[in-house]
Amino acid sequence: MNISVVIPTYNRFEVLKRALNSVYSQSYMPKEVIVIDDGSTDNTVQIQELFPHPNSEGAPHVKYIYQENSGVSSARNLGIKNATCEWIAFLDSDDAWHEDKLKEHVVFHQHNPEILMSYTNEKWIRGGIEVKVPKKFSKFEGDIFEKCLSHCIIAPSATLLHVSLLSKAGLFDESLEVCEDYDLWLRLTCKHSVGLIDKKLITKYGGDEDQLSMKHWGMDRFRTQSLENLLKLLSELEMQEYYNLTLKTLVQKYALLLKGAKKHDKILDISLYEKKISYYQSLSNFS
């Protein structure tokens, strides 16, 4: 099973080394490792000289590709386009894999050849201390579309998928600065079952100010954009049940945004969200 690893990065040379060390310490070695440098101004270019890890016999050298700063979706997409393997594993440069991560995926898909995407559970580190993962990020398997509607439960670093899924569903939406993973997983899970390896096989490090999740307030502003696009897709596919679930979630999210806009007296946003709620409520009856 040949695997391409795609790692987007931007000005994270030190933590990128940690991420790559976790790749080159895998008990099952990938065929290629692609680092997409999204316009870094630090020492990231030097990363190709440091890997593979000295103890990883036969491991591939890092394929380093530089692009002008265009965002994480663009970087991941460029990595996908340059990948030569049928299976792709994503790794964010501030995360790390546990040594049997890829091996567990390979074993899973050997036993479940009909499933073309799997993900693992995760460990969270905040400020150097392990914290309990909130219950809302609980993991599920099989038909998980409805579980993915509220928020993103699948970390990119936890996933392995077959490229055929991306040729059908499309790549990451480059118009979304954040929630691009949430958007892609919804497009995939509306049509495909997903496998879960219920082991903590990645470590997610959080709390840094440069992380996108720390940069933006009101993440539902981006999720509503994704859900509106998804409604069009589900309508074309005539997936009425998923369409209704998406519509209901969209109204709920606009209601939350409206509440926040009223709290902060944002007149233009209040007007926009009221119109959105009225329009989407008119498309269906909600219990």
Image (spheres, helix red, strand yellow):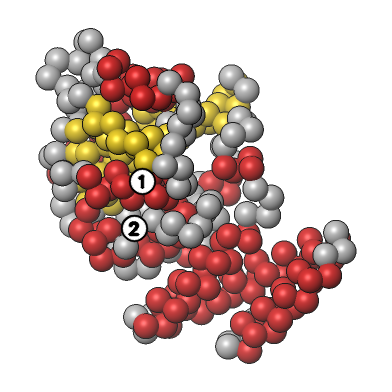
Do the CB atoms of the residues marked 2 and 1 lie less than 8 Å apart? yes
Residue type (three-letter) at the residue carrying disc 2: Leu
Q: Quadrant of the N terminus?
A: top left
- The secondary element bearing badge 2 is classed as loop
Residue extending furthest top? 54
Image position, residue 177 (x, y; %): 53, 52
Residue depicted at 58% across the width and 49% down the height: 136
Pick whichever, 49 or 277, lies toward us.
49
- The secondary element bearing badge 1 is classed as helix
Instruction: Check residue 223 in the rendering and tell me which mark sits there, or answer none.
Output: none
Instruction: Check residue 76 in the rendering and tell me which mark sits there, or answer none.
Output: 1
Q: Is residue 80 visible?
A: yes
Q: Is residue 248 above or below residue 173?
A: below
Image position, residue 89 (x, y; %): 29, 41
Residue depicted at 40% across the width and 24% down the height: 44
Q: In this view, does 279 lie above or below 85?
A: below
Q: In this view, does 263 lie above or below 102?
A: below
Pick whichever, 143 or 155, lies toward us.
155
Image position, residue 218 (x, y; %): 68, 55
Q: In which quarter of the image is residue 35?
A: top left
Residue type (three-letter) at the residue carrying disc 1: Arg
For label 2, count other residues whose C-alpha is less than 10 Å away and answer few (under 14), some (14-19) or many (20+). many
For label 1, count other residues whose C-alpha is less than 10 Å away and answer few (under 14), some (14-19) or many (20+). many
Q: Can residue 121 be seen in this view?
A: no
- In the rendered structure, the answer to whether residue 169 lies left or right of residue 210 reads left
Pick whichever, 92 or 244, lies toward us.
92
Q: How many labels does the image show?
A: 2
Whichever of labels 2 and 1 marks the residue nearer the N terminus, that label is 1
Residue hosting label 2: 171
Residue depicted at 19% across the width and 33% down the height: 32
Image position, residue 73 (x, y; %): 42, 50
**Distance (Cα) linking label 2 and label 1:** 9 Å
